[in-house]
Image (cartoon, rainbow, N blue to C red):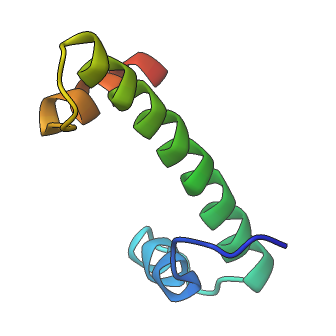
């Protein structure tokens, strides 16, 4: 199993803030997996956008645009 970039405790907090009274470990792990996949896709798109613009640096605008293309 690969190591995760996001903390499991953060997933519990997110779900609690969303209104959950109780959170199973499986649901927190699944949310982490989904968010990491989404972040990976956004990151790849943002890198492509920065390269297309002739930059090596990823800017916030790249992230914003990349996230809109996945919606």
* Image coordinates for residue 59, horizontal then vertical, percent: 15, 37
* Image coordinates for residue 68, horizontal then vertical, percent: 34, 22
- Which residue is at the front of the view, 58 or 14? 58
Which residue lies at the image location 76% right of the left edge and 70% below the top edge? 2
* Image coordinates for residue 64, horizontal then vertical, percent: 23, 31
* Image coordinates for residue 58, horizontal then vertical, percent: 22, 37
Q: Quadrant of residue 31?
A: bottom right
Q: Is any atom of residue 36 visible in this view?
A: yes
Q: Is any atom of residue 71 visible in this view?
A: no
Image vertical order of residue 56 relative to residue 23, above or below: above
- Is 24 situated left or right of 40 in this image? right
- Looking at the rendering, in which quadrant would you find the C terminus? top left
- Is 6 situated left or right of 50 in this image? right
- Is 22 situated left or right of 59 in this image? right
- Which residue is at the front of the view, 61 or 14? 61
Image vertical order of residue 18 relative to residue 20, above or below: above
């Amino acid at each position: 199993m690969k190591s995760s970039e996001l903390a499991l405790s953060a997933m519990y907090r997110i779900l609690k803030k969303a209104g959950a009274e109780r959170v199973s470990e499986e649901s927190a792990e699944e949310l982490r997996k989904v968010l990491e996949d989404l972040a990976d896709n956004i990151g790849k798109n943002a890198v492509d956008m920065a390269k297309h613009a002739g930059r090596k640096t990823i800017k916030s605008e790249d992230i914003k645009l990349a996230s809109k293309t996945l919606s």
